Structure formats: C-alpha cells, structure tokens
Image (cartoon, rainbow, N blue to C red):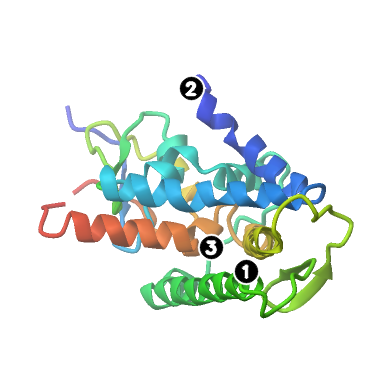
Amino acid sequence: MERKFKLCYVSDECVACGTCMKVCPKSAISINNGIKAKVDANKCVGCGKCAKVCPASVMRIGERV
Amino acid sequence: MKKQWNDYLYIISALYLILGFFNIMFAWLGLLCFSIPIIISIVKGNKAYCNKYCGRGQLFQILGTKFKLSRNKDIPKFLRSKWFRYGFLAFFMIMFINMLFNTYLVFSNVKDMKEVVTLLWTFKLPWNWVSTDMFSPWVYQFAFGFYSIMLTSTVLGLITMVLFKPRSWCVYCPMGTMTQGICRIKHRGDEF
C-alpha cells in the first residue's frame, strides 16, 4: 500500500544543532557526521514538528517523490 | 521520551551565569564549553556536544517554549548564511585573542587588573563586589574577560531567542560553526 504521509526535507544550510532530532516522535532524524540532519524516509511521517523547532528554518515538509 | 541526565544540563548553564555574580573564578569553568565540543568534533567527528550536551541550547529551548518567551519566527536568511556564520566566528576569535592578550598584559605587569565585565564588547559593567585577592591578578583578569564573553553570548542568544526561534543562537554560535567546520574537514570526500 502506498504511504500517504508527507516527508521532511533538509536543505544544505542545516547547522546540525540537533534540535529536530530531539522532537522527532519517530526518531527518524540523525545528525550525519556533524554536518547535516538526515531524515530516514521509512520512519518519517511528515508531522512537521522538526520544521517547527528548526532554528535555521531549513526543514521543509513536502510530498514524497 | 524518557529524560536522561544530559537533559538537565541547562541547570548547569544557568548556575554558571549566576555563580559569576558571586565568585568570578567560576568563569574559568566556561573553558569546558570551549574545549569539549572541539575535542569531540576532532576525535569523534561529530557534533554530539551541540546535539546532546549543550546546556545553553537547552536553556534557550526551555525559556522559549515552556516560558513562551520566543516569537517563534523564522530567522532572517543572512543570519544563517555561511558568510555571517564564519564572519561571526572570526570576529569572536579576534575578541577571544584580544581577551587573552589583555590577560598577558596583566600577567607581565604592564596593565592593572580591572574588575570589569564588558557586555557586548562595549558596555563596561563594574564588577567590584567579588573577591579578587586569592590568586594572581592575571587569573582574575582572564576570569573577567571570559565571563564577559559568556555573558555577551548569552545576551545575544536571549535577544535572538525572543525575536526568532528559541535556539536561534545555535545558528550562529561560534562553537557550533567551528565544530561543523571541523566535521566538514574530517569527513571531506565522504558521501553524505
């Protein structure tokens, strides 16, 4: 069955602070090599909590492609 | 999610700022906030300090969300640009070196120790109620200088917390920028 959830995308301006990681209810976010947040597409449900708290506003909730 | 010991580090950050009002020597402990993130980024190649152990970030998050002191607006684009972040890091480093130089001048008896905390690199606040006769004057000079840096960055963090999102300080925090830069160098060529 096709998943209807949206997905979170992270731009390259991410500062890797980890604020998003703490609020993600599905533990779908990790900070990859201290450079950028990485979202596990299989876990992300596109709830948008990460985008709401991201201090750099670099997270965007969009349709899955 | 169950809270862990490191979720309470904001208490240490708040205590640090308060204790400086009573004994300026506590300022020296701030060196931990400088050295630990750098060591972690060099040795481990990650930003675990920012991600898990930064008490200051937690403090801003709590003040901004639980106490609702933040407007929760997007930070202006220029503040998150590489130019601004690395420029602020360079400025911060110059001010840090200047503080070390002042400590050296007191150490070599060229200048007298000043019981002053300088806020935002401009406003000189007399801090003469704290005791300064237990150690050499240069030890206190460093403490005043370091406390000035810590207080200044807290004030900047509080301003951007109110204006934008709670952890806006993290966007241009010099330590965060530096450790991310170290991680970039360390993982150069790695596939993201």
Tell me the CA gap for discs 1 and 2.
50 Å
Q: Toward the viewer: B74 or B174?
A: B174
- The image quarter containing residue B142 is bottom right
Which circle, 1 or 2, is nearer the viewer? 1
Residue B13 % position (x, y) = 64, 43
Residue wearing tag 2: B1
Label disc, if present, on residue B107 of the rendered structure: 1
Tell me the CA gap for discs 2 and 3.
27 Å
- The image quarter containing residue B126 is bottom right
Q: In this view, does B47 lie above or below B163?
A: above
Given the image, on which type of amino acid does mark 3 rest? Asp
Given the image, on which type of amino acid does mark 1 rest? Phe
Residue wearing tag 3: B74
Q: Mark 1 lies on which chain?
A: B
Asked whether the residues under the numbered discs 1 and 2 touch, taking CB atoms below 8 Å apart as contact, a structural biologist would say no
Given the image, on which type of amino acid does mark 2 rest? Met
Q: Earlier in the sequence, mark 1 or mark 3?
A: 3
Q: Can residue A46 be seen in this view?
A: yes
Q: Which chain carries label 2?
A: B
